[in-house]
Image (tube, coloured by chain):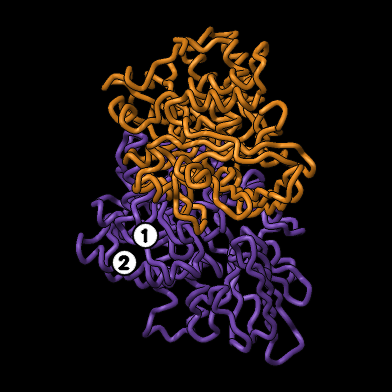
Chain colours: A purple, B orange
């Protein structure tokens, strides 16, 4: 990819990361405005590949934490983000030399770019999820044995909370109520990494991947249908390449249950010209899809509902009865599908009964 | 007072701090066991007066935070306490040279003594409440402008949360849900002070006061009734001297409502030989008492229900129908009754409609 992220990349990153958000991860739109402002003010952001991270680099995460539905009303700023990173730097006694996204899917793709611009630091072409997940411990960093803590959370009033927890799961458990008490939309930094740790635990090429996906969806002058362009872009990527459209139709049933800080639910899509039906389950993010009772894709592989015309992702909170949509699935990065990884991000972690079967194998099975 | 706290003082401190807990503050019994063990192992604890604190001293707080009803089942240890203080020392880059109690009333009178023994540090004859209060911002430290944060909380698993909040009230707000998620019985350190700050913001002579009160209640060989001895000890103290027994009788009505992490309630005591009734209101601690509709004492002045025979304090959770009790009131330290102090610990802070009138004035008013 380009060695810089410029104003031209921002919309593509927003559209692509929205796809990788698989229904969750929050709306990147407001973050994209923040990015534009930061790049206009501080200039383009240098991008380094995961391979280019040096041993003595200090790689810090910039991220928002909270409820996506609140984030679009209670804004946070780059200054809040700085307080979180700065507190972690002071605690550790070392300064960031590069910024990385914890979660390329959804709005957490944006703040790291804006923040790297402000700090004049490079951003890593990679992240810790390769998609979006609802909890702090669900990262490739954690899977590779990097500690989530020390971790900081900062609100817009200048309050900072620093966690030194024994596990990432405990950080999640102790952070969530503080985030709620701070108003459910705040900034954080966690998984501070040495260069060696970042190189071994990050999922490479997901920032460039998101931009490529967004660019493919948005490209005008290409006579192919947006959905075809999307699938072609996924297939061209190193990780998302087992990809396809498993269903098209209109939304005919929708159940949502907002509880324990998440949105749980089911979405049924009916074919326009047959009795065929697709059923998706979600917990913020889409978790699984079956078509006429046959599993097509299950977490950590990616399931995204996109608009049938524009191929733009439709987040969980914007699903509506009657919408014409397509269900696009693709393979997760291999860092998320090892036996150790599946203990952290596999179907069991979302209370699903499914055994994980790679989406590539499921597609072959249904074709045979 | 003696220059050392020895094994002989521990029971008296437990009995006296239970009185100063005014119905709340938690049971000092388990803490007294911890104190005995620590003093047996590490030796007696040196006591310094507030006046003796030097400018370059670093005065740290050792305290438990949580629900008193949980604390008697989910124990914490001196090691948990050390993790909390140690994290704060490392964050600030300075070591404690003296330990002080944040709250002399109830169980938080005990851990500071045990912890000072372990560290081989002196304990200050003073505290931040002169009694017990239910929230972190309700201290003479805060009233005098000392910041509650940075503040640390540590659980028994090695998890530590550090707060850098803008106000003490916010520390309370952000700490409470973490304490609940940690199991509602953990250790903390807050209000780290320079010697100058501690000297100017502490309430002096409350540790020795608690021991004197406990000793008076427990003294055998003194032919006076325990209740008389208690009142005499209060009257002999610099701060608690406006003291008296405002009612005796048996408990005939009791309402408790456990909600939002506190126990709210009302206790009615009926005279044995007349129609006279006393009505107390409490929120963990006793807040006010009226007799036949006339206010006798209101927070921050102290109201404690004691056993009519032994004069031992009866905590809110042990009040029971039919108990023979006396209601003892006494004046609060002057640090709690200034106009600024009443904004932090006055009747309004507990949603009471009363204007604060000093208990001494109320006693005179009813006599005239």
Residue drawn 53% across the image and 23% down it = B233
Residue at mark 1 to residue at mark 2: CA–CA distance: 8 Å
Horizontal arrangement in the rendering, residue B11 relative to residue B169 (left or right): right
Residue drawn 59% across the image and 61% down it = A261
Q: Nearer the viewer, residue A285 or B226?
A: B226
Coordinates of residue A280 in the picture (x, y in percent): 68, 72
Can residue A138 be seen? yes
Pointer 1: what residue? Answer: A111
User: Is circle 1 on the same chain as circle 2?
Assistant: yes
Coordinates of residue A144 in the picture (x, y in percent): 54, 41
Coordinates of residue A172 in the picture (x, y in percent): 55, 48
**Which subunit holds the residue at mark 1?**
A
Relative to A6, residue A173 above or below: above
Q: Residues within 10 Å of mark 2 (few under 14, many from 20)?
A: many
Q: Nearer the viewer, residue A82 or B174?
A: B174
Pointer 2: what residue? Answer: A34
Coordinates of residue B262 in the picture (x, y in percent): 61, 49
């Amino acid at each position: 990819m380009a060695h810089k992220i410029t104003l031209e990349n921002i919309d593509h990153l927003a559209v692509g990361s929205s796809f990788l958000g698989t229904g969750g991860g929050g709306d990147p739109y407001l973050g994209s405005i923040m990015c534009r402002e930061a790049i206009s003010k501080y200039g383009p952001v240098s991008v380094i590949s995961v391979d280019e991270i040096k041993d003595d680099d200090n790689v810090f995460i910039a991220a928002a934490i909270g409820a996506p539905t609140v984030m679009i009303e209670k804004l946070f700023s780059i200054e809040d983000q700085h307080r979180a990173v700065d507190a972690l730097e002071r605690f550790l006694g070392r300064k960031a030399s590069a910024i990385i996204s914890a979660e390329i899917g959804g709005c957490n793709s944006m703040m790291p770019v804006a923040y790297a611009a402000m700090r004049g630091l490079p951003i890593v072409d990679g992240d810790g999820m390769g998609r979006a997940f609802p909890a702090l411990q669900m990262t490739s960093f954690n899977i590779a044995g990097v500690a989530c803590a020390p971790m900081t959370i900062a609100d817009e009033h200048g309050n900072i909370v620093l966690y030194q927890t024994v596990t990432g799961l405990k950080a999640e458990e102790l952070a969530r109520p503080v985030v709620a008490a701070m108003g459910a939309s705040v900034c954080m930094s966690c998984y501070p990494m040495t260069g060696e740790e970042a190189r071994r635990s990050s999922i490479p090429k997901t920032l460039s991947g998101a931009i490529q996906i967004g660019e493919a969806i948005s490209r005008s002058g290409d006579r192919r249908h947006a959905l075809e362009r999307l699938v072609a872009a996924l297939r061209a990527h190193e990780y998302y390449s087992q990809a396809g459209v498993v269903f098209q139709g209109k939304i005919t049933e929708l159940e949502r249950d907002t509880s324990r800080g998440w949105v749980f639910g089911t979405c049924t899509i009916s074919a326009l010209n047959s009795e065929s039906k697709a059923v998706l389950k979600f917990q913020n993010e889409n978790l699984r899809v079956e078509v006429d009772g046959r599993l097509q894709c299950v977490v950590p592989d990616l399931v995204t509902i996109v608009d049938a015309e524009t191929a733009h992702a439709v987040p969980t909170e914007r699903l509506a009865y009657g919408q014409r949509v397509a269900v696009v699935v693709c393979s997760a990065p291999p860092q998320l599908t090892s036996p150790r990884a599946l203990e952290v991000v596999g179907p069991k972690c979302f209370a699903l009964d499914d055994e994980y079967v790679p989406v590539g194998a499921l597609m072959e099975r249904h074709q045979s």
